[in-house]
Amino acid sequence: MPKQFSFYSFFTKYSLMEDYGFSSGLRRRLFRKILPEVANERTIEYFLLKNENSVEQVLALLNLKKLGNSHVLKELDLSIKALGAKVVAFGLDNSIKAKFDDLQLNAQPFEVLFEKLSTIENCDQPTTINLMAQLESAQFLIVLLRKNKHKIGTNFHLTITTRKILEYIKQIKILLTLKSNFQSEEHWEEIFSRYIEYSKHKNSIRRFIIRHTDLVALEIVEHTSNKGGKYIADSQQEYWSFFLKSLKGGSIISIFALFKIAFEYHQLNPLQNALFFSFNYALCFVLVKQLGGIIATKQPAVTASAIAKGIDKNDDLKIDSIQNITTLIRKVSKSQFISILGNLLMALLFSCLLTFLLKFFGFNQVLNTIKPTYLIKNTVPSGNLVFFAAIAGFFLALSGLISGYIDNKVVASKLAYRIRNSSLLFKSEGLANFIDKKSGALAGNITLGFFLGTAFLLGDLLPIPIDIRHIAFSSANIGYSIMSEGFNYNIILLALLGAILIGTINFVVSFSITLFLALKSRGASFQILPTVIKNVLKDFIRRPIGYFIYTKRDSV
């Protein structure tokens, strides 16, 4: 083994040259698959990896007793300084420091860390302990920054940068420990083994893609999870409040379901229909939100994110407790049940009432637009109904994620603050408050309206029919149908069963998609899903009513 192997790149591991975006990082890894990167022949990692020497062989060739005053110790000190400088530069960066100030967090640990790093060469045991303490404080501040993403907003760059800085801090701690035990064979063995493991996955395309898609998912669902808590009943009062709000939502949907029936009756061309349907759906969803109503099927997307947030309370991207998942799923189940029940009942009954009033006051022209047989047929259980309900569920999940994404961008870009200080926009406080509080919900409702209104156009492009089925609109259609024509009880029961089936599929698809993304964003292994399902089934068998009705036991 040569006398002057460089240890510097081995100690630092990370390079500023590795600070790339997703596409360039992917290209770099693909290139390395064709032409593997080889360490410089003068480095210890070349000797360690190229010749496939075991850790024991390398240690046998290293004379640890003679390393005390060698260039290796100097390179170790320089590596600690280099990584520390990156951590300090991050903590004292103008943009990051402003975020610390917004959260009323003191960035002093980064300043002290900078001072301590300058004397690393003469670092004794008490100084090392103090330096470790400053690193812990800096790490704590970064974790707090990540925990408060809903207050300061987040983006892909900030998320990946904070994760990278946390990796730097971890590496500095390892190097400091090695410095304090410089002649310990055990510590050298550990750091060599760590590097070998790191080098195995450094250029993995699969890990790179998974890691970055997890970060994108985290950015998207972060604000969605904050909304989700509002739709999980934590008390009996909230439970029945959801029922009343869903009744209001169902009544408004009944009116707009009649508008949609009228648009279909006039047999406009597909593009005109798509435009009218989209505006009708969008206006309906916006009005329900503005008037304080609830559309049950819009809740799964946000409640799924809230579940993921609730089971990772430490925000360390680790699942804290399987029992927490079970408890939250039970709460979500009963909250969804009462909301869906309210939407279904009111949409059905209010449409019956509207039909009666139209007949009573002689609005026959409006009544003539209703095609009872066609409407009933669309709600009777069938393969198409299941497929169309699943499509609606997908769009419900997508619109919920868009809503959370917009909310996050508004916070991250400080859009409301900029509006308040924009002369061009007359420093409008009202506009700033509207953008701050309503933009995400508005974007979600409008996009959902256009998704549902234009879905049928995909049927003209694809070899299979495409449409949507939504529980509240389908329930309203049943009401208009049975009040316009005398169907037998079997047909009515089948239609009602179809409406319940639509609601179930709307919920399951929307909830599953968002929960998948939310758990993925928090680094959850899907190997836990069988355990979760098993726990939920056991809990359901013990207290089935608790998944539908809020009981006194739930308040304990």
Image (cartoon, rainbow, N blue to C red):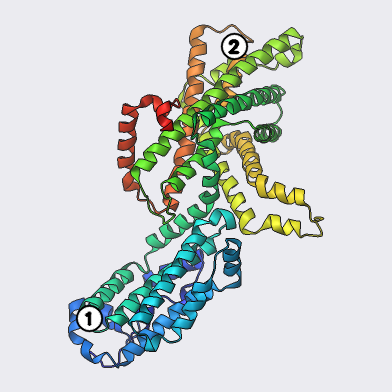
Quadrant, the N terminus: bottom left
Residue at the spot x=34%, y=43% of the render? 322
Residue 459, can we see it?
yes
Q: Which of 229 and 521 is in front in this view?
A: 229
Is 51 on the left or on the right of 526, as rendered?
A: left
Q: Quadrant of residue 482?
A: top right
Q: Give the image location of residue 510, x and y in percent.
A: 49, 37
Q: Nearer the viewer, residue 447 or 162?
A: 162
Q: In which quarter of the image is residue 354?
A: top right
Element type at mark 1? loop
- Do tag 2 and tag 1 residues touch (Cβ < 8 Å)? no
Q: In this view, does 540 lie above or below 153?
A: above
Q: Dot 1 surroundings within 10 Å: few (below 14), some, or many (20 or more)?
A: few
Q: Give the image location of residue 41, x and y in percent.
A: 32, 86
Please tell me whether mark 2 or mark 1 is closer to you in this view: 1
Is 371 on the left or on the right of 512, as rendered?
A: right
Q: Give the image location of residue 556, x and y in percent.
A: 41, 33
Residue at the spot x=61%, y=67% of the render? 98
Element type at mark 2? helix
Q: Name the residue under label 1.
A: 184
Residue at the spot x=56%, y=8% of the render? 487
Q: Nearer the viewer, residue 59 or 496?
A: 59
For the residue marked with disc 1, what is the amino acid?
Ser
Q: Which of marks 2 and 1 is nearer the N terminus?
A: 1
Q: Dot 2 surroundings within 10 Å: few (below 14), some, or many (20 or more)?
A: many
Q: Name the residue under label 2.
A: 482
For the residue marked with disc 2, what is the amino acid?
Ile
Q: In this view, does 109 lie above or below 552?
A: below
Mark-to-mark CA distance, 2 and 1: 84 Å
Residue 26, can we see it?
no
